[in-house]
Image: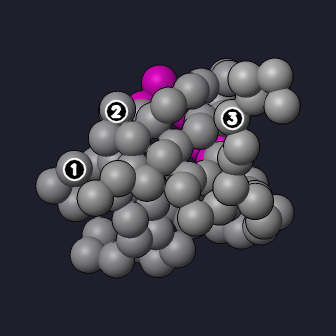
């Protein structure tokens, strides 16, 4: 393994989700492409709207979901890692 980092197994979901900003406001729909125990790949309609820190949930209720940090972006697709 020539310096490659082992990633957690990702499960393909292609399931609707919600992104909310810190503070629980401005919920935006997204598509959760895949997810692992450490993060997820999501697609949003407007690529200019995601801050560094956000919450990802499968309902519009901002009290649910997991805190995330954006780690990469490719157009309207983002990689996020789960943070505590």
Crowding at dot 1, Cα within 10 Å, few <14 / some 14-19 / many 20+, comes out as some
Q: Earlier in the sequence, mark 1 or mark 2?
A: 1
Identity of the residue drawn at 61% across and 53% down = 40
Q: Quadrant of residue 36?
A: bottom right
Identity of the residue drawn at 22% across and 60% down = 24
Q: CA distance from mark 3 to mark 2?
A: 26 Å
Q: Quadrant of the C terminus?
A: bottom left
Q: Do the residues under discs 1 and 2 have CB atoms within 8 angstroms? A: yes
Q: Earlier in the sequence, mark 3 or mark 2?
A: 3
Identity of the residue drawn at 35% across and 53% down = 83
The answer to whether one can see residue 29 in this image is no
Residue 74 placement, left or right of 56: right
Residue highlighted by disc 3: 5
Residue 9 placement, left or right of 65: right
Crowding at dot 2, Cα within 10 Å, few <14 / some 14-19 / many 20+, comes out as few
The answer to whether one can see residue 40 in this image is yes
Residue highlighted by disc 2: 51
Residue range corresponding to the magenta coloring: 42-49
Identity of the residue drawn at 29% across and 69% down = 62
Tell me where residue 23 appears, x and y as whole percent: 16, 55
Give the dominant element type of the magenta stretch: helix, strand or loop: loop
Residue highlighted by disc 1: 22
Q: Do the residues under discs 3 and 2 have CB atoms within 8 angstroms? A: no
Mark 1 residue element: loop
Mark sitting on residue 69: none
Tell me where residue 65 appears, x and y as whole percent: 39, 71
Up/down of 69 relative to 26, above or below: above
Q: Nearer the viewer, mark 3 or mark 2?
A: 3
Mark 2 residue element: loop
Tell me where residue 37 appears, x and y as whole percent: 58, 64
């Amino acid at each position: 393994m020539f310096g490659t980092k082992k990633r957690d197994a990702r499960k393909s979901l292609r399931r609707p989700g919600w992104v909310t900003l810190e503070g629980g406001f401005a919920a935006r729909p997204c598509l959760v492409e895949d997810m692992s125990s450490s993060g997820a790949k999501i697609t949003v309609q407007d690529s200019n709207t995601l801050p560094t820190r956000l919450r990802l949930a499968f309902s519009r209720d901002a009290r649910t979901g997991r805190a995330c940090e954006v780690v990469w972006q490719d157009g309207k697709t983002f990689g996020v890692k789960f943070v505590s």
